[in-house]
Amino acid sequence: MSGEDFLDKLLAGVAVVWMPLGQVGEFIRGNGMQKKDFVEAGFPAIHYGQIYTRYGLAANTAFTCVEEGLAKRLRKAKNNDLLLATTSENDEDVVKPLAWLGNEVAISGDMMLFKHKQNVKYLAHYLQTNEFQEQKRKYITGAKVRRVSSGDLSKITVPVPCPDNPKKSLEIQAEIVRILDAFTQLTTELTAELTARKKQYKHYRDQLLSFADGVVEWKTLGEVAKIGTGSHDTQDAVDDGTYVFYARGREPLRLNSFDFDETAIITAGDGAGVGKVFHYAQGKYALHQRAYRIVPSEVMEPRFVYHCMASHFYAYIQKASVSSSVTSLRRPMFLDFPIPVPPIAEQARIVAILDKFDALTNSLTEGLPREIELRQKQYAHYRDLLLSFPKPQEVMA
């Protein structure tokens, strides 16, 4: 049965009314809580930033607490309230929803709660659809920090099945939620599996790259590799460039010319990626002027060097620095990084094991990240399909 056929059978001829959120419920803005107000034990509380970083679509338990005295002055959400983070640096995350299924919880400012009589998860699913995203965009304001007001949110319409029969309406909403929750639950399980596999990968990586004194020869990175930078700036990038352009971030760019044709480990020279190894280059590529290339010599298996740096280089940089926070790297900081030099055959054996874990936990073309991406796309497809009810003008047309 197709999604459209299922929806027709589920609705069984009942009307779906598109209602402004202001008629469906009431928006109430949070107040007066900062991250510094969190305490070990007290009244459960949610800061708006946690909706982006700690929660998924729904939750019944808070991660943090505030003192009871402060909690008395804060606005609180109750079971079946919809929590909305209403500010972000990008349009997509403005009005990020959280269906609250727990007991009373205090909420911060830059957050609104929406009180209503619908299925809260039905509303949370709908607020992630393309239809809702298109509606909200015309109400978003602000330059660097993007936001939307409760007055404008009240104008946005949502589909409510047979609003004149609340019992029937909630039954229909619950069935749609049941189907969509099956997709999100699978993604949640895969994400938990990925977290477990990453811990397992780290354990084996640390174990395989730890050598007792005298077992292997140790050298410095400067002795076993060439180290240098590129010559390009981020503004040189082009959308459909022929060659990979490694800059300082996790996502590579493109360029129509290349600097090097080799196998190399790439790490950022400054910015948020300092000390972290995001890329393993093979073949022709271009490089940012503040990114470093590490090209291993013939005594080293390049992937072995990659795993050593991915495992230990960030901690080494932090420990070697005289400041508490390293914001940029210079070539001399690479030279003394200690690296084990077991026989090439042993390096290859270790690489074969670690590469399997690396593919399972990090690859976007195979392994768990790829599977999670596919399930998220599947969820988005059925979410938009099951919540795409015709509007009056569409019916008339």
Image (cartoon, rainbow, N blue to C red):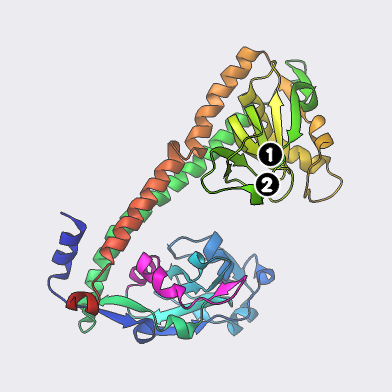
N-term-proximal mark, 1 vs 2: 1
Label tally: 2
141 sits left or right of 329 in the view? left
Please give the residue where the numbered disc 2 appears in the rendered image.
Answer: 273
Q: Can residue 19 be spotted in the picture?
A: yes
Farthest right residue in view: 322
Q: What amino acid type is highlighted by mark number 2?
A: Gly
284 sits left or right of 359 in the view? right
As displayed, is residue 260 above or below residue 299?
Answer: below
Q: Quadrant of the C terminus?
A: bottom left
Image point 60% across, 84% down: which residue?
73
Residue 219 on the magenta segment:
no
Q: Nearer the viewer, residue 254 or 58?
A: 254
As displayed, is residue 81 above or below residue 59?
Answer: below
Distance between mark 1 and mark 2 Cα atoms? 7 Å
Residue 141 on the magenta segment:
yes
334 sits left or right of 21 in the view? right
Q: Residues within 10 Å of mark 2 (few under 14, many from 20)?
A: some
Which contiguous range is marked in magenta?
119-147
Image point 55% across, 80% down: which residue?
30
Image point 62% across, 70% down: which residue?
144
Q: Secondary structure at mark 2?
A: loop
Dividing the picture into quadrants, the one containing residue 267 is top right
Marks 2 and 1: in contact by CB < 8 Å? yes
Please give the residue where the numbered disc 1 appears in the rendered image.
Answer: 267
As displayed, is residue 47 above or below residue 181?
Answer: below
Q: Quadrant of the N terminus?
A: bottom left
Q: Can residue 161 be spotted in the picture?
A: no
Q: What amino acid type is highlighted by mark number 1?
A: Thr
